[in-house]
Image: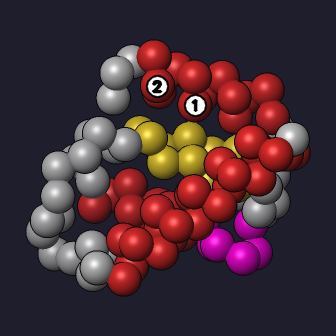
């Protein structure tokens, strides 16, 4: 279970870093990235609109929605979360 908390913390740091360096909301993306965005439909801490905006800003980003999850999809839907992360890492992206 510790790796699940670590994964969530890494996600938080990723979004915080993008916001800190002004990469969110930019008219033109200032970075090239292969990304898979994951959002939890019922997240009241990080609203789904944040992930949707980020996915729109990254060319070819893939957005995955966890419809039954709140802030912790890696806890609430762990099998799907692990499968998606595994697929992303295996793709070499």
Image side of residue 51 versus residue 80, left or right: left
Which disc, if any, is residue 44?
Answer: none
**Is residue 11 in sight in this rendering?**
yes
- Looking at this view, is 49 or 30 the one in front? 30
45 in the magenta segment: yes
Q: Residue at x 52, y 67 (%)?
A: 13
Q: Which residue is mark 2?
A: 89
Q: Quick one: quadrant of the N terminus?
A: top right
Q: Where residue 67 appears, x then y in whole percent?
A: 75, 46
Image: 28 above or below 75? below
Q: Nearer the viewer, residue 20 or 27?
A: 20
SS at badge 2: helix
Q: Residue at x 33, y 29 (%)?
A: 93
Cβ–Cβ below 8 Å for labels 2 and 1? Answer: yes
Q: Residue at x 39, y 18 (%)?
A: 91
Q: How many marks?
A: 2
Residue at (81% x, 35% y) in the render: 78
Give whichever of 88, 42 is nearer the camera: 88
Image-quadrant location for residue 23: bottom left
Q: Is residue 25 above or below residue 3?
A: below
Where is residue 18? Give x, y as percent: 36, 71
Residue 85 bears which disc, if any?
Answer: 1
Q: Is residue 25 visible?
A: no
Q: Secondary structure at mark 1?
A: helix
Which range is magenta?
43-48
Percent position of residue 20, x then y: 36, 83
Q: Nearer the viewer, residue 72 or 64?
A: 72
Task: Please name the colour scheme applied to the rendered image.
Answer: secondary structure
The secondary structure making up most of the magenta span is loop
Confirm whether the magenta stretch covers residue 72.
Answer: no
Residue 17 lies in quadrant: bottom left
């Amino acid at each position: 279970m510790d790796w699940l908390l670590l994964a969530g913390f890494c996600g938080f740091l990723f979004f915080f870093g993008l916001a800190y360096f002004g990469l969110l909301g930019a008219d033109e993306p200032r970075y090239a990235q292969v990304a898979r965005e994951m959002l939890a439909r019922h997240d009241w801490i990080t609203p789904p609109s944040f992930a949707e905006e980020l996915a729109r800003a990254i060319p070819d980003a893939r957005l995955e929605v966890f419809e039954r999850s709140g802030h912790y999809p890696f806890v609430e839907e762990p099998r799907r979360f692990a499968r998606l992360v595994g697929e992303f890492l295996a793709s070499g992206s």
